[in-house]
Image (tube, rainbow, N blue to C red):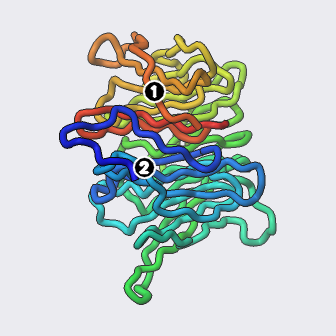
Amino acid sequence: MPPPVPPGKRKEIYKYEAPWTVYSMNWSVRPDKRFRLALGSFVEEYNNKVQIVSLDEETSDFSAKSTFDHPYPTTKIMWIPDSKGVFPDLLATSGDYLRVWRVADGETRLECLLNNNKNSDFCAPLTSFDWNEVDPNLLGTSSIDTTCTIWGLETGQMVGRVNMVSGHVKTQLIAHDKEVYDIAFSRAGGGRDMFASVGADGSVRMFDLRHLEHSTIIYEDQQHVPLLRLAWNKQDPNYLATMALDALEVIILDVRVPCTPVARLNNHRACVNGIGWAPHSSCHICTAVDLSSAATKYRPTIPQLSGQYAGIGIIGCFSTPATTQFILFPSTWLNIRTCAP
């Protein structure tokens, strides 16, 4: 066992080496589970793994707390967005299906498998999903079958000492003309009903759960280059960022001015594969690139978003192609990037 870190001192870099290539990862935000990560493996076969690791603050080392089997690599992995610790300790993963897991007493068990195509032995793989921060009973998934599905979680009757969790389809819609690659809920309009998606048709589309008969095309690439990821500004829901396949830039959009980017962050030296807005500021965003696992942090030159962005440095991050997560810890910023091997 490594010796404890002297009082008053903290490591600048914390390292954990997984037993396989990491494809996806996500920080837990529960206040009673500080510095806890879920990691998804990338193994080119059916049998893959998810591992939960946490930081021992006395020794300043990460250690594995739980490992469980998962079919295929997880295209995304997320802890329930429960910053107050009032909901069950749940973890969701996407791949062939959306799965919700419960973590308790050092063990992880499958709580429910959400399948919207029960009449067939085949399924359309899920490319991504998002968990609604305002209403954690809502999840949205994107799929290669051109659809987005909004799921509702339910806490059922207590069995023993545990409330069982189940899920149902609230709505499914054809979101794009081709595969849908990402989905994200917006904090606009109360933070519950608005979401956007991107796909292989090269468009960003915004939806309102209260009026699904209409959608708004926020942006469309002129060459119809596929858009891979999108991320909403955490502090100002008028802004979102997206990136195209094999692009060296990130596009910043204002939903009030559709189809006209307000900025292009283009001083990257390699293809961008991840984006993440800061949780505490409307003016900071991290971008991850295929360049020595690096990320560039941007901020505008004036307090308002003006389209005048400047790269202000390269910061270290963990590299693996599913999520970029910008986390605010006490007195420090930490960016975690996960991407394809």
Residue 247 or 172: which is nearer the viewer? 247
Whether residue 237 is visible, yes or no, is no
Give the number of the disc on residue 62. 2
- Residue positioned 40% across, 59% down in the render: 136
Label 1: how many residues lie within 10 Å, few (<14), some (14-19) or many (20+)?
A: some
Query: What percent of the width, then of the height, locates residue 232?
Result: 44, 35
Instruction: In the rendered view, tell whether residue 164 sits above or below residue 273.
Output: below
Give the number of the disc on residue 163. none
Residue 90 or 139: which is nearer the viewer? 90
- Residue positioned 53% across, 27% down in the render: 288
- Residue positioned 61% across, 24% down in the render: 290
User: Are the residues flagged by discs 1 and 2 in contact, CB closer than 8 Å?
Assistant: no
Q: Secondary structure at mark 1?
A: strand
Q: Is residue 86 left or right of residue 194?
A: left
Residue 331 or 200: which is nearer the viewer? 331
Report which quarter residue 169 is drawn in: bottom right
Query: What percent of the width, then of the height, locates residue 304?
Result: 30, 18
Which residue carries the number 1 mark?
316
* Mark 1 → mark 2, Cα distance in angstroms: 18 Å
- Residue positioned 40% across, 10% down in the render: 308
Query: What percent of the width, then of the height, locates residue 108?
Result: 50, 69
